[in-house]
Every structure is written in C-alpha cells, then in structure tokens.
Amino acid sequence: MKLSREEVLHIARLARLGLTEEDVAKFGEQLSNILENFEILKQVDTTDVPPTAQSIALQNVMRDDEVTPSLAPEDILANAPRREGNCFRVRAVLE
C-alpha cells in the first residue's frame, strides 16, 4: 500500500511533527513498507491461535520474602557523617 504525500503529511500533523520535503519522501517510503508487511501478515492463518497478551509464558523472577534479622543501629550508623540518636541527620530539604 503506497502512501500519498498528503497522507504522510496528515500522519506527521497528527504526530505534531514538522517534516522537510526530504523527510516526507523518506518516511513515505518507510511507512509504505511497514503497511506492505502488515498486508503480508494479514494472509497468515490464525484461526487456531488463541488471542493472548503475551507471546511467551510469564514466570515470577522474584524470590520469596524471608524474614531475616536486621543490622544493629550502631553498625548502620557507623559511617554516617551526622547522626542524631539512632537516626541519620540530614539538612532540611523543604522549608
């Protein structure tokens, strides 16, 4: 399916793109090639293929949460430049 110059300009206008004449020719050819590829794909028999949102099965790659003992406050604050009690002391971010 060959796109006309006006169709390419219309698509560019919808996408809020400013195109030069060189861009119109280049994108017209590229978009036409993409549409031709979709025409080929439309010929594939997909009657026995169930609709799906994923092409491969999903699996969880996260580990299970496990309770572990936490570090002692002294170990955590050992390298803190400033501290106040068992907390980090930082400069105020908001007034």
Image (cartoon, rainbow, N blue to C red):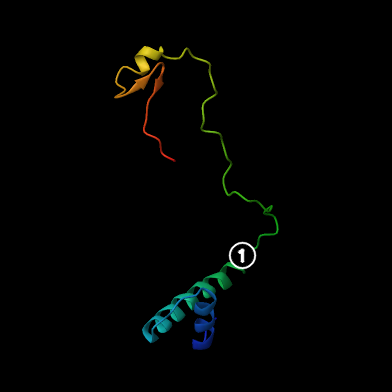
Q: Position of residue 44 (x, y in %)?
A: 61, 65
Q: Is residue 78 above or below residue 55?
A: above
Which element carries disc 1, helix, strand or loop?
A: loop
Q: Is residue 74 visible?
A: yes
The residue tagged 1 is 44
- Residue shown at the point (50%, 83%) measured from the top left: 9
* Residue placed most toward the observer, 59 or 84: 84
* Residue placed most toward the observer, 3 or 75: 75
Q: Is residue 49 left or right of residue 25?
A: right
Q: Is residue 27 left or right of residue 45?
A: left
> What amino acid is labelled 1 in the image?
Val
Q: Is residue 2 visible?
A: no
Residue that extends furthest to the front in the rendered view of this protein: 95
Q: Quadrant of residue 87?
A: top left
- Residue shown at the point (53%, 18%) measured from the top left: 66
Q: Is residue 68 above or below residue 28?
A: above
Q: Position of residue 74 (x, y in %)?
A: 36, 12
Q: Position of residue 16 (x, y in %)?
A: 49, 75
- Residue shown at the point (50%, 82%) measured from the top left: 8
Quarter in which the N terminus is drawn: bottom right
Q: Is residue 48 above or below residue 18?
A: above
